[in-house]
Image: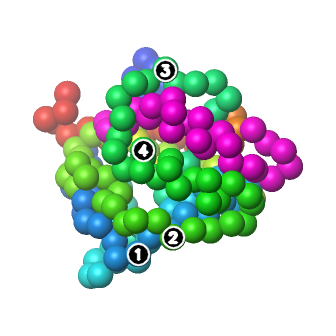
């Protein structure tokens, strides 16, 4: 059974399995950052199992490959630090030029992210960097991290391809895709 909210989201309340996020709170054995010319990405190697996502509307186990960062031209105005982001910002000078890489001190990707989610938004979309292939399923869970302006300022020093100063992709048309809200009976 599906129904649509006044906001235009298609609601899918009968997915019986929660979205499960596992192993995001473990530190990897090795971690690196890279300036791809379009973003800064983090890749990691783990002893044992890598972070993964299962359940919800997914068919199978999806394993973490990389984290990418995006920054806009305007400051955020947030003042609450996230320790690992502050540590990361202190190493961004090592990857200011496109295609540069650096090893960084390993840290858990998201300490409090290991949990099950009974409500979330998902949609079929595209990569947020070239070639922008329409091959991604995006999940938005109710977790938000605020980044302090000093961290954003360090990201803004990164040199991107073609002289770009921001790597936030503008909102794209839905093109007949549906944005779906999944919620269990406990989330209403």
Q: Residue 86 got which mark?
A: 4
- According to the image, label 2 marks what residue? 103
Name the quarter where the N terminus is drawn: top left
Tell me how far mark 3 sits from mark 4, CA to CA.
Answer: 16 Å
Residue farthest to the left, as pictured: 186
Tell me how far mark 3 sits from mark 1, CA to CA.
Answer: 32 Å
Tell me how far mark 2 sits from mark 4, CA to CA.
Answer: 16 Å
Figure check: 30 above or below 95? below
Q: Is residue 54 left or right of residue 5?
A: left
Tell me the crowding category of disc 1: few under 14, some 14 to 19, or many 20 or more residues within 10 angstroms, Cα based: some
Q: Residue 77 got which mark?
A: 3
Tell me the crowding category of disc 4: few under 14, some 14 to 19, or many 20 or more residues within 10 angstroms, Cα based: some
- According to the image, label 1 marks what residue? 30
**Sequence order check, earlier mark of 2 and 4:** 4
**Sequence order check, earlier mark of 1 and 2:** 1
Image x and y of residue 25, in percent: 25, 59
Residue at the image point whose x is 59% and y is 35% from the top: 153
**Sequence order check, earlier mark of 3 and 1:** 1
Mark 3 touches mark 2? (CB < 8 Å): no
Tell me how far mark 1 sits from mark 4, CA to CA.
Answer: 18 Å
> In the depicted view, which residue is nearer to us: 157 or 65?
157
What secondary structure is found at the residue carrying circle 2?
strand
User: Is 162 covered by the magenta stretch?
Assistant: yes
Figure check: 108 above or below 143? below
In the rendered structure, which segment of residues is drawn in magenta? 141-165
Image x and y of residue 12, in percent: 33, 40
Give the number of callouts. 4
Figure check: 164 above or below 75? below
């Amino acid at each position: 059974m599906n129904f649509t909210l006044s906001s235009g989201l298609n609601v899918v309340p009968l997915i019986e399995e929660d979205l499960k996020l596992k192993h995001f709170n473990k530190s990897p054995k090795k971690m690196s950052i890279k300036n791809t010319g379009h973003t800064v990405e983090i890749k990691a190697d783990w002893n044992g199992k890598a972070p993964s996502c299962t359940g919800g509307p997914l068919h199978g186990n999806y394993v973490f490959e990389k984290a990418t960062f995006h920054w806009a031209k305007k400051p955020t105005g947030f003042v609450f630090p996230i320790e690992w982001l502050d540590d990361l910002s202190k190493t961004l000078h090592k990857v200011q030029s496109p295609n540069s890489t650096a090893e960084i001190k390993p840290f858990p990707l998201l300490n409090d992210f290991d949990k099950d989610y009974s409500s979330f938004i998902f949609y079929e979309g595209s990569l947020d960097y070239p070639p922008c292939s329409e091959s991604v399923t995006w999940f938005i869970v109710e977790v938000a991290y605020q980044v302090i302006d000093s961290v954003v300022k360090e990201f803004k020093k990164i040199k991107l391809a073609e002289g770009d100063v921001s790597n936030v992709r503008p909102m794209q048309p839905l093109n007949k895709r549906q944005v779906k809200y999944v919620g269990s009976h406990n989330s209403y």
